[in-house]
Amino acid sequence: MSFIVENLRLKELAAVAEQNRPAFEDFVDFLRSHGYQSLHSFIIEEDGKKAESIILRYLQRPLPNNVKLFDGIARPYQQDKAKWLLLGWVLRDAPEQRLRPMIASMPGNNTAEKQAYLLNKLRSFVATIFPENNRWDWTSVSEVIVDRLEGSRRAIKGTLFEVIVRRNLKNIFDEQKLQLTISDAEVRLDGETYDVSVIGKNGRILLPVKTRETMGGGHALLFTRDIHKSISVAHDAGYECIPIIIAESWAGNLETLNCRDHVYINMNPNQIIQVEPVLAAELRKRLPAFKAIK
């Protein structure tokens, strides 16, 4: 097969990052309205109390109607979350994964005050690490935003394929008039999660949905191990398991999978439009298994 040489993920992320530029520029304009010539001049502000009050005012100020912050697949965040995320990204941190658990322990009478206190501590810290003016222009900050959006996008696209699997199964079951229930949420068994579950009068089939964009590296081994563990836990619990794997040139040995059947689509999951019809056809081939539990 011909591989996709172009990094489709990077292209998408760069486009979304550029959509976030107005939010960044709005924050810089806000700082200018409070006497700062640039973002850099605010970052190096020596009066911590003053800087904290500026951050609090920004968090409390509504965003202009035309300003939004977008996640990894270009969906807008709610305003309060958008402002929190933007400042966390600008300050070179992970606002949800690392910072959010700290908020409750910060001084302040409400969430905004606690966020402002924490963000100001970060501001004074990163000012010593990146004192150069050019570290605080859009070009530099946008690279940080691309990195942060990648994590957001990875999580969202994983759930996106779960939705696609559910939708196609529903279409197939409706066509075949099969009285089967498709789970609305993931199923947890012994620490493992199964994205889709099909339930009939005579049993249940678990369908873990695994996607991977790249081919090699240590994470590829973890990806393969994760698939094997999901199958093993499902079988130990007495359920049939049909893993759905969408990965370009996955190096895992399909013959070693401890299951009667699996779906492997040798395509880049970024090609959603191209992948979906192939996925639908593969699910249709599994009709005998689904009919067996009706």
Image (cartoon, rainbow, N blue to C red):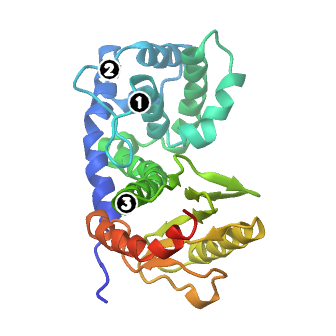
Residue located 46% across and 34% down the image: 85
| Residue to which mark 2 is pinned | 63
For the N terminus, the image quarter is bottom left
With 190 as the anchor, is 142 left or right in this view?
Answer: left
| Residue to which mark 1 is pinned | 82
Residue located 64% across and 88% down the image: 256
What amino acid type is highlighted by mark number 2? Leu
Which of pointers 2 and 1 lies earlier in the amino acid sequence? Answer: 2
Q: CA distance from mark 2 to mark 1?
A: 9 Å
Residue 100 location, quadrant: top right
Residue located 56% across and 38% down the image: 96
Give x and y (percent) for residue 49: 56, 14
Residue 35 tag number: none
Question: Mark 1 falls on what kind of element?
Answer: helix
Which of pointers 1 and 3 lies earlier in the amino acid sequence? Answer: 1
Q: Residues within 10 Å of mark 2 (few under 14, many from 20)?
A: some
Question: Mark 3 falls on what kind of element?
Answer: helix
Give x and y (percent) for residue 162: 46, 56
Q: CA distance from mark 1 to mark 3?
A: 33 Å
For the C terminus, the image quarter is bottom right
Residue 34 location, quadrant: top left
With 37 as the anchor, is 111 left or right in this view?
Answer: right
